[in-house]
Amino acid sequence: MNIVHILFLLALLASAVLALRNPREPLGAIRLLRDVRGIVDYNLVSRDAQRALEEFSEAFAMALAQAPTEQWAKELGFYFSSRALKTTYPIPFGAAGYAEFKGDMKYRTLLEKSLTLKPKTWQDGVSELASVVEAPDFIGWGTEPQRIALAGDALLNEIVATLLEANGTLGIYEDTALSAYTFFDDAHPFNLFDTGLGTFDNDITGSGTNSTTANLVLAKQRFREIKAANGKPLGLKMTHVMVPPALEETWRDLLERDLIVESSAAVDNRHKGTVKIVVNDQLTDDNQWYPLALNKPGLFPWVVQDEGGPEEIRSDKDSPLYKSQLKVGVAYVKRANAALALPHCIQRWAGTAP
């Protein structure tokens, strides 16, 4: 029983009381009953399914415009908006640098190594029986427009987080002796075409890899030791640390406090303000943490691509959905994908205590 039915019953009771008190003047009771009946009739007007779908769309657009999701996948990687079904991205493996001109111009090959990205199609939507949507007591779509908008806004984050935790093989190593190497590995070459120049390890495992000031220092040093393809220092500096929610407060203590304790004494925290904390809500491992060095233009740990905003598909009473299931609904489609790129500018620490 809804509020309208309750009002109507109360009106019947009130009209009966009025009629008993004034049996010779029943007009007051009749007038009250008529007024309330008018309210009931107004509220029992069926909703139009098409208008209900429009309301969903409006709520979705508003939620998307106000979405609070931190777009770390776009901000920390290389983002490209395109409707292309396949995109080839050049990966900078050669070392840029000027050399003395001696009569002949020297050129580096743009597509010395590349990766190809093919967007995948993703969708989410909600539907309901048209009879339910058009019923007088249907109060709207609840929070579904907002939930779908937020999920779509976080899609690239979800894709990249899944890739990082899966730690698959690298596309840029295909057709080389390193084709079995994973993104996080202990022997990446400084120069893919001259492995004799040395290697670096971006997969730090074992005990004593947890989140500490000492390991923060080691992570910074590891980036500084990586060399370019010409054997000279690459010049990487740690700029970010990506952590799961479980480690957020630990890293805020490490990077935001004015004082820290060393050798039982309080000292100035020289690491304060040197590294930005990125809390990744999509990570599932509560111990692993990921230092990043993004100070060199053109060096990026992953590539992400989408079409921008989602495509909306409304299924009203003229749609196949209604004709087959008697339902109406709204769905949203996004075409997006991501690929891991350069292992030089990211590390993975297992986070295991000593």
Image (cartoon, rainbow, N blue to C red):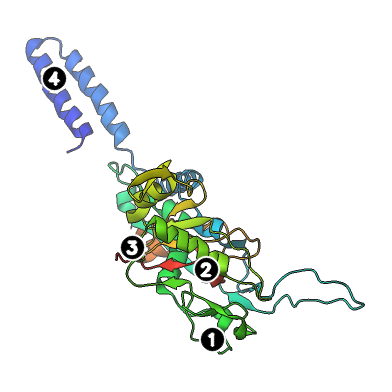
User: Where residue 171 sits in the image (x, y, percent)?
Assistant: 55, 79
Question: Could you tell me if residue 49 is visible in this image?
Answer: no
- The residue sitting at 52% across, 68% down in the picture is 337
SS class, disc 3 = loop
Kindly identify the residue that appears in the image at 35 percent across and 59 percent down. Answer: 327
Q: Are marks 2 and 4 in contact (CB under 8 Å)?
A: no
Q: Is residue 82 left or right of residue 128?
A: right
Circle nearer the N terminus (1, 2): 1
Estimate the spatial distance between the alpha carbons at disc 1 and disc 3, rounded to whole Å.
28 Å
Amino acid on which the number 3 mark rests in the picture: Asn
Rendered location of residue 205, percent (x, y): 38, 72
Residue placed under numbered mark 2 in the picture: 337
Q: Is residue 304 left or right of residue 96?
A: left
Mark 3, other Cα within 10 Å: few <14 / some 14–19 / many ≥20: some
Q: Is residue 19 visible?
A: yes
Closer to us: mark 2 or mark 4? 2
